[in-house]
Structure formats: structure tokens, C-alpha cells
Image (cartoon, rainbow, N blue to C red):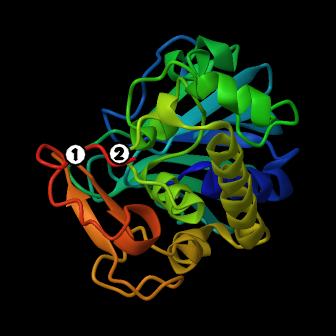
Amino acid sequence: MPELPEVEALREFLDEHLDGRVVERVLPLAVSVLKTYEPPLTALEGQPAGSITRYGKFLAVRIGELHLVTHLARAGWLRWQDTLPDRPPRPGKGPLALRVVLEGGGGFDLTEAGTQKRLAVYVVRDPQEVPGIARLGPDPLADGFDRDAFAALLAGERRQIKGVLRDQSVIAGIGNAYSDEILHAAKVSPFKLAASFEEDQVTHLYEAVQETLRAAVERAHGVAAGRLKAEKKSGLRVHGRTGEPCPVCGDTVRSVSFADSSLEYCPTCQTGGKPLADRRLSRLLK
């Protein structure tokens, strides 16, 4: 799933390649992708693209007086093409969900692999009209998001820290992969209760959030859209690396599986050497 660093890199990429270009056509190819109907997609045609803004894991492109907002969900992606095929694509064939054609040639496709179609596109007058954006928590890389602001979010939270970091209404933009990476960097169990952190632990976790996300954004800076997925994977230390040695201590990276996802962690670095066999059976480790 694209998370804050990858969506930020896509924002930078589109800002460089899209700004000022006029939209010629917008072609919806998947029935499930469009979540709004007024204004229609055709209202974007003939309008120039302007500023591109990231809201957590949402990407909003200003086109004329409207905004084309997308959330790439788990398996979605944006593919830029300097030259698009002359023949219009056929709806319902392959992963292509929506195509934006620009005057003068080129444009981009929104694609989604797999059978669970969750990629979402909205055409709105204000990005705050999108429910997922309206309920977002603060952006962890925003200027005002300091250590005290982070501590206030954890205070009173009786949930496990892994879930708190992934909750978009608490902190915007962190998903499954980077929450694993942050907790590994902070040497914290994913099952530790958020409200149980002591002051120095809050500081250490806040620093891990900042360092992990900023390093990922820096790695992704200037990387072409088509290579961002590979760049993300290459920079991960524990997420998606079950069975491999931890790059810090050499212990074996382990995982805990859930209904629709999994988490990865290092027992030596994060849980005092105790493996977390199963979420339902493991104790909350402090």
C-alpha cells in the first residue's frame, strides 16, 4: 500500500510533470472507482491542472476550480506515460481504472491490481468534502507536529501502539509498513499500550516517527513514479522481511498474521527476545 512517503513522492512528480497542462479527457474504466457524480468527470476536461496537495495518503490535483482526489488503497498505483495509445482502452479489461489524457500528448493512468477494488476517485470543489480527508488526524511531517502534539495523541489511548499509528484519524499517512519500521527503529513492541509510554519513551518514539518518515521521503525524492514501489521495498528493514536477519541485531524477523494483514518485528530489538506467536494468545508486552 502506498503510504505517506510514496504519496509525497507522487505529489512531487506530478507537480513537476502536470502543472499547467490542460486536461483533454478523463476516462473512467472501472465502475467501482468513481465515488462522486456531481460535479461530473467531464467538468475537468478543457481545464488546466494546478497545485497538487497530499492529505495523508490522499492525493488531490487541482484542475480548474475543481479537485481530482484519489486514494490508491492497498493495490492502486499511478502510472505516468509521456505517450498514450491512440486507441481508447476498453472498460473492464485488466487493472486500468481511470485514464487522464492531456492536451499535447501524455497523461497518467490509475491502476489497481487484484480482486479487491478499493481504489477511490472523487471530483469535488473542496478536498474537505471527501469523508476520508475530513476525518484525518494531523500530518506527522507538518511544521506544528512536535513532540508535545504527539504525546497528546497517545495520552489516554488504551489501544496497542501499532493500531494507533495506523489510525488515520489519529495520525495521517502511516500505514502497515511504516508503522512496523517506526516501531522497530524505536525498539518498541507493536502490542504495547499507547497510554503506557513513559516520557522518555514518547520522545524516543516521536523521534523514530520523524526519522523513519523523513528518510523514506528523502529516498523517494526524485524517483520516477514507476520505480517508487521498488524503492520503498528496498528501504524497509523488517516489514515484508519475515525469516530474514534483522539488520540491527541479526535475530530472525518474525510476523504475526491477522485476517487481512500482518505485522513484522524483531524479537531481540522489540520484545525482549519473546516471539509473539499469535495476537489472540500473546500477552501485551511492555
Left or right of residue 229, residue 284 in this image: left
Give the residue drawn at x 81%, y 36%.
142
Query: Does any portion of residue 1 appear in the rendered image?
Result: no
Say above or below: 54 vs 44.
below
Q: Residues within 10 Å of mark 2 (few under 14, many from 20)?
A: some
Left or right of residue 73, residue 224 in this image: right
Give the residue drawn at x 19%, y 47%.
279
What is the x, y in percent for residue 241? 36, 77
The residue mark sitting in front, 1 or 2, is 1
What is the x, y in percent for residue 249? 48, 84
What is the x, y in percent for residue 48? 82, 36
Say above or below: 63 vs 27.
above
Query: Does any portion of residue 199 appear in the rendered image?
Result: yes
Query: Which quarter of the figure is the N terminus placed in?
Result: bottom left
Residue 141: which quarter of the image? top right
Say above or below: 279 vs 6.
above
Q: Which mark is residue 191?
A: 2
Q: Disc 1 designates what residue? A: 283
**Marks 1 & 2, CB-CB < 8 Å contact:** yes
What is the x, y in percent for residue 59? 64, 39
Instruction: Identify the element where label 1 is drawn.
Output: loop
Q: Residues within 10 Å of mark 1 (few under 14, many from 20)?
A: few
Say above or below: 250 vs 258.
below
